[in-house]
């Protein structure tokens, strides 16, 4: 599968860790590094059973951007097959998404069933994906109702993200390891 990424990915992000300078301020979560912004809150999504950090969620004005980075090969992209599997999965749950040209290339936009307290709701959701060198970064934006201005702020957080693939051999599609920042200063 062809790699799908914005034409300006190397200069506009999301970045490979090798493409950002050592002086660039980032919050280090292992495979994902986030450029800090005053208006955003960051939460680590932890699997209760394994106590493993599964994703990072950035929140700005009631809108959430969930980030996950996956291992990939140098030549094959994961975004196209991921979109196809997301389309099927969302349809199987009773939701609907469609491929749309967005600010970082093709994205999925639609309505996805979610649980809010005791109620099942349909939540507006947008899936973003970028194939990088040996990694794939996925973002999921959701909110009760998506405000385009806030959405673009989250897209800029997505684009400013740096992925640290590491040197460990991993099969394509494997979630890259996340961790909480080590020092209090980083947090």
Image (cartoon, rainbow, N blue to C red):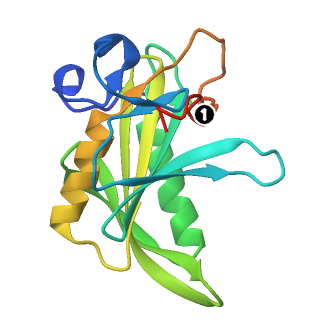
Residue closest to the eye, 128 or 166: 166
- Left/right placement of residue 55 relative to residue 39 reads right
Q: Quadrant of residue 30?
A: top right
In which quadrant is the N terminus drawn?
top left
Q: Quadrant of residue 18?
A: top left
Q: What element carries label 1?
A: loop
58 shown above or below 98: above
Category of crowding for the residue at label 1, using alpha-carbon neighbours closer than 10 angstroms: few (below 14), some (14–19), many (at least 20)? many
Q: How many labels does the image show?
A: 1
Where does residue 105 sit, x and y in percent of width and height? 23, 43
- Left/right placement of residue 133 relative to residue 44 reads left
Residue closest to the eye, 36 or 120: 36
Where does residue 19 sit, x and y in percent of width and height? 30, 14
Where does residue 43 sit, x and y in percent of width and height? 52, 53
Residue bearing the label numbered 1: 178
Residue plotted at (37% across, 19% down): 16
Question: Can see residue 2?
Answer: no
21 shown above or below 143: above
Question: Can see residue 151?
Answer: yes
Q: Residue furthest right?
A: 49
Q: Which residue lies furthest to the bottom in this view?
A: 119
Residue plotted at (21% across, 32% down): 6
Residue plotted at (41% across, 48% down): 139
Where does residue 141 sit, x and y in percent of width and height? 38, 60
């Amino acid at each position: 599968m062809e790699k799908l990424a914005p034409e300006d990915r190397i200069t506009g992000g999301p970045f490979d860790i090798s493409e950002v300078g050592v002086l660039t301020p980032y919050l280090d979560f292992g495979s994902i590094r986030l450029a800090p912004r005053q208006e955003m809150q960051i939460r680590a999504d932890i699997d209760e059973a394994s106590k493993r950090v599964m994703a990072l969620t950035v929140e700005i004005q009631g809108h959430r951007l969930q980030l996950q980075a996956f291992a990939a090969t140098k030549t094959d992209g994961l975004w196209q097959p991921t979109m196809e599997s997301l389309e099927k999965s969302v349809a199987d749950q009773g939701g609907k998404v469609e491929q749309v040209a967005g600010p970082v290339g093709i994205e999925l936009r639609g309505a996805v069933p979610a649980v809010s307290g005791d109620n099942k709701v349909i939540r507006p959701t947008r899936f973003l994906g970028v194939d990088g060198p040996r990694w794939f970064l996925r973002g999921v934006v959701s909110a009760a109702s998506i405000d385009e201005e806030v959405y673009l702020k989250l897209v800029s957080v997505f684009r400013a993200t740096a992925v640290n693939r590491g040197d460990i051999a991993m099969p394509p599609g494997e979630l890259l390891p996340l961790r909480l920042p080590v020092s209090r200063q980083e947090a």
